[in-house]
Image (cartoon, helix red, strand yellow):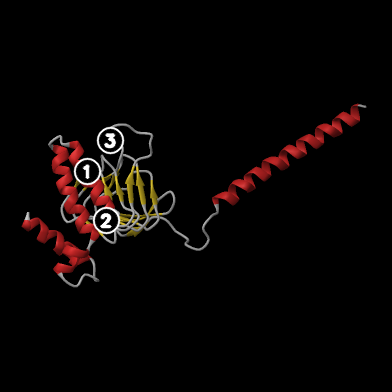
Amino acid sequence: MFAQLREDIACVRDRDPAARSALEVLFLYPGLKAIRMHRRANWFYRHNMFFLARWISQRASRKTGIEIHPAAKIGKRFFIDHGTGVVIGETTEIGDDVTIYQGVTLGGTGKDTGKRHPTIGNNVMIGAGAKVLGPFKVGDNTNIAAGAVVLEEIPPNSTAVGVPARVVRRNGMRVDNLDQVHVPDPVKQELDHMNRIIEALERDLSKKVEDVYEDF
């Protein structure tokens, strides 16, 4: 237990330049508190003591602002930075050396049964506010940009951005000419499409009215 705690503290200090000491991390970092409480909740869950497991997880949520279902499977050296608003669903599986930031949701879409939540590979970083929704895998060594909404599988060694998220870099090579300035406006595109349909209908109606006048 103490070896695991030392490993948890070391991983926080390695990844957070603001962490000044082991004591600061141990007593003041909500992400570390949340994962320690999750391990206890998960132990009770695996031993069919579901009420106690949920009681611990809900207590952790109140104390840290991080909600982790006790059934979620989480690997080694998991780091939640800041942490407020993080939600991790029941059937989520997380590999080793994963880092996530505040506001991240590893959740479901409401359309699946059984395995409903994502599987996160090893050495994955998920940026602030990102949502990963559904029972698919995010591959090893992948970065999910802040604010991205991931709705399908992401291959290993990738960087994914956007809503919905798309892969813009894989194996160190750019795969999409992402333009951060001239981003298409989906609402404007839909309105333009509707205007074209209305114009076509108006032309068709005018022609029919002209044909009726000619008949008279």
Disc 1 residue type? Trp
Residue 124 image label: none
Disc 2 residue type? Thr
The mark lying in front, picked from 1 and 3, is 1
Q: Quadrant of the C terminus?
A: top right
- Tell me if label 1 and label 3 are in contact, CB under 8 Å: no
Q: CA distance from mark 3 to mark 2?
A: 26 Å
The residue tagged with tag 3: helix, strand or loop?
loop
Question: Is residue 120 visible from the viewing direction of this image?
Answer: no
On the image, which quarter does residue 19 sit in? bottom left
Q: CA distance from mark 1 to mark 3?
A: 23 Å
Q: Nearer the viewer, residue 77 or 208?
A: 77
On the image, which quarter does residue 65 sit in? bottom left
Q: Nearer the viewer, residue 150 or 193?
A: 150
Q: CA distance from mark 1 to mark 2?
A: 14 Å
Identify the mark nearer the N-term, 1 or 3.
Answer: 1
Return the residue found at the far top: 215
Q: Residue at x 23, y 51 (%)?
A: 60
Identify the mark nearer the N-term, 1 or 2.
Answer: 1
Question: Is residue 130 visible from the viewing direction of this image?
Answer: yes
Mark 1: few, some, or many residues within 10 Å (few <14, many ≥20)?
few
Residue 115 image label: 3
Disc 1 designates what residue?
Answer: 55
The mark lying in front, picked from 3 and 2, is 2
Q: Is residue 27 above or below residue 201?
A: below
Q: Along the horizontal axis of the image, is 182 left or right of 32?
A: right
Q: Nearer the viewer, residue 76 or 28?
A: 28
> Residue 207 placed where, x, y %?
81, 35
Q: Residue at x 54, y 55 (%)?
A: 184
